[in-house]
Amino acid sequence: MEQARILWVDDEIDMLKPHIIFLEQKDYLVDTSNNGDEALDMISPGKYDIIFLDEQMPGLSGIETLERIKEKYPNLPVVMITKSEEESIMEDAIGSKIADYLIKPVNPKQILLCLKKNLQTKKLVSEKATFNYQQEFRKIGMDISGNLNAAEWIEVYRRLTRWEIELEKSNDPGIIQVLNMQREEANQVFVKFMMKNYAGWIAGSTTDRPVLSPMLFREKVFPLLDKQGPVFVILIDNLRFDQWKTIEPLIGEFYNTDKEEMYYSILPTTTQYARNSIFSGLMPLEIDRRYPDYWVSENDDASKNQFEGELLGEQLKRFGKNLKYSYHKILNLEAGRKLHENMPNLLSNDLNVIVYNFVDMLSHARTEMEIIRELADDEPAYRSLMLSWFEHSSLFDIIRFLSDKQMPLVITTDHGSVRVQNPVKIIGDRNTNTNLRYKTGKNLNFNQKDVFEVKNPHDIHLPKSNVSSNFVFCTGNDFFAYPNNYNHYVKYYRNTFQHGGVSIEEVLIPVITLQPK
């Protein structure tokens, strides 16, 4: 590691010789000055990593020296050292953006701790995160290879997500690679678990069925309505659990998390199927049969989710919920602003549902726009971009407003997404749908080893576009590619975020119950 360079400025610098020798023995390079004017002349871009600055000096005072340093070098850390404990001096120093504050007489251990905190925090946090994950790596691996049930898979995914976010602080690319390999292993086993159990869950023939999309309102929203009255439900399209954890601290300033849970999206993990299922409380096949006017088939060019408000109303009727409710879908910035302005008019409703499409639009934009690809080059950058949007969004404004009005809140989503890597060849006719993670149609040609195939869609309560239609789903981080213009297609879509198939990231999704502070 390169030696850190320190400039120590003190009018009694000769009396600090033992401290300076101590630091030099610890492999720091230390320059000294006994006045502010000289110190300012000594500082140049990149020369010093940190400044120790005496607050009480004749001539140019420490505070004045600090102000001049910050004018020219705003990012250079300065540690103020003073004999005084007066609050006004501390406020002056803090207002000038000091890195730390030490009271004389300082001892060598204090100085060393200050240096480590200001110069090595990132490295120390990285090392600790790496060490802690190494300690848990084996246990997670054993859990993955065990015979996990639906609830236990949620806990494994929760732990993997926690480590993914923690290890963003790591400078060790090797440990990131290990985590990615463990996530891939988890996905491989999870896919087998889904293939084994999914049809049974849909048929209701198993006792350990998790909460699925059509059960979401019944299990998570209706009890809240019955218990405490008015509730707002915000559904952020395509919100993954790791993205929820990224925005949680911002929301935490205004809301306490009552329950942080996950549920299972139905297949296909797309808006057309999962979100219609959420609002209707039914599987897609039942929607098609009960409300044919509200179900838009794969081959229809119309919007596939244009009747969500009507489906919500039908679900409320079926469960005897005689409520005053509203449904709003936000597809652009202007619509979000208008909704924010209209929020006072919604407070008298028993239930308000708001669908925010931003994350889904961001996913599509990242695929189609080179600049967004560059801004969100990997998972941490993608989370960071989502966080930046949320912090300045009308959605955050709405959440702050609701907290101020003491309104309970449910935040959830319809499905997640996965960063795709591996192309899987498939051949279909012109009526085959365009989604990269699932295909439905007749005469599909593919390698059965590469996919999760459902020969009879009715087995998992999906409509058929024709008598011989089947569904095939990509698993893990695969995506479908046609043989025609194969190389161009693969290059364009590799490393994009897609949904519709079977992976932990798409299927296990957050539902958060929040109470206002």
Image (tube, grey):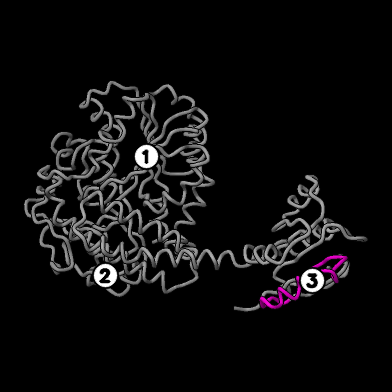
Observer-nearest residue: 455 or 411? 411
Q: Are marks 3 and 1 in contact (CB under 8 Å)?
A: no
Q: Is residue 24 magenta?
A: yes
Q: Are marks 2 and 3 in contact (CB under 8 Å)?
A: no
* Mark nearer the N terminus (3 vs 1): 3
Q: For numbered disc 1, what is the local secondary structure?
A: strand
Q: Does 331 sit above or below residue 8?
A: above
From the image, which quarter does the N terminus lie in?
bottom right
Task: Name the spot of residue 80 as percent of width and height, x first.
Answer: 76, 58
Q: Marks 1/2: CA distance?
A: 38 Å
* Mark nearer the N terminus (2 vs 3): 3
* Residue to which mark 3 is pinned: 43
Residue 259's mark? Answer: 1
Q: For numbered disc 2, what is the local secondary structure?
A: strand
Q: Quadrant of residue 469?
A: bottom left
Numbered disc in front, either 2 or 3? 3
Residue displayed at 12% across by 45% down? 206
Q: For numbered disc 3, what is the local secondary structure?
A: loop
Residue 470's mark? Answer: none
Residue displayed at 18% across by 42% down? 284
Could you tell me the amino acid type at mark 2? Pro
The boundaries of the magenta stretch are 8-29
* Residue to which mark 2 is pinned: 423
Could you tell me the amino acid type at mark 3? Ile
Could you tell me the amino acid type at mark 1? Lys
Q: Marks 3/1: CA distance?
A: 52 Å
* Mark nearer the N terminus (1 vs 2): 1
Q: Quadrant of residue 107?
A: bottom right
- The residue most toward the left is 467
